[in-house]
Image (cartoon, grey):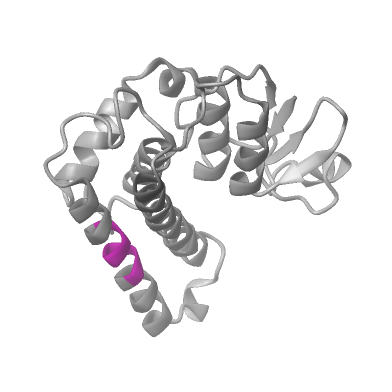
Amino acid sequence: MHLVGMLDSPYVRRVAVSLTTLGLPFTHESVSVFRHYPRFQEINPVVKAPSLVTDAGVVLMDSTLILEHAEKLAAPGRSLAPTDLADHARAQRIIGLALAACEKSVQIVYEHQLRPAEKLHQPWLDRVKEQLFAAYRLLEDEIGTTEGWLFGASPLQADITAAIAWTFTTRMIPEVMPADAFPAVARLAARAEAQEAFKAWPYDG
């Protein structure tokens, strides 16, 4: 398989770390949707990161859909989802909160980096920041005083996505989200970033 996209994207990094954790081999090509638009267009005309080209040549996109497919390819016992139904629902909630935090962080980055200063719409930006903090407040509550992984002895998708979201947010917009704003999320991210799968695919911002 061939993963396409930059590791400064939390969505690309989420896929890379997850595929490695699942034990699925793949190659990676750092292609920017901005700087390398023609090259990305050759691979996926939609130019959406991440894109994953399967062994059969099928081009998949959207990190959640890519990882849904990856779960089908993983060896028995290597799933990143809890088997217990209640744990699965809670894990999906945590992943949803983390992805919402990613989305709101990206919106803030794009607003400042791509939109002319005179076109900034502060009420909308304030609303996005409010949503961002709400997502992390709820994540903080979900993690609580947990000192290990959220659903067992090893990191699963909820741990991976929450950690990657926090690293992205605090590295890209530290003026909005200080690294110590949510201590429980920060501790989880620090534990995750020390794992080999995370170190193999470091944030590249």
Furthest toward the left, the residue is 145
- Left or right relative to 87: residue 81: right
Q: In percent of the image, x 15 and y 44: which residue is there? A: 183
- Left or right relative to 44: residue 10: left
Quarter of the image for residue 27 reads top right
Task: Evaluate whether residue 10 shows in this view.
Answer: yes
Task: Evaluate whether residue 179 shows in this view.
Answer: no
Q: Which percent across, then down, holds residue 103?
A: 48, 59
- The residue lying toward the viewer, choosing from 173 and 87, is 87
Q: Which percent across, then down, holds residue 49?
A: 66, 45
Say if 92 sits above or below 31 in the image. Answer: below
Q: Is residue 118 magenta?
A: no
Q: Write down the region rendered in magenta.
A: 131-136
In what quadrant of the picture does the N terminus appear? top right
Say if 146 sits above or below 65 in the image. Answer: above
Q: Main secondary structure of the magenta part?
A: helix
Q: In percent of the image, x 69 and y 31: which residue is there? A: 3
- The residue lying toward the viewer, choosing from 72 and 83, is 83
Q: Which percent across, then down, holds residue 64?
A: 59, 47
Q: In percent of the image, x 50 and y 28: which residue is there? A: 17
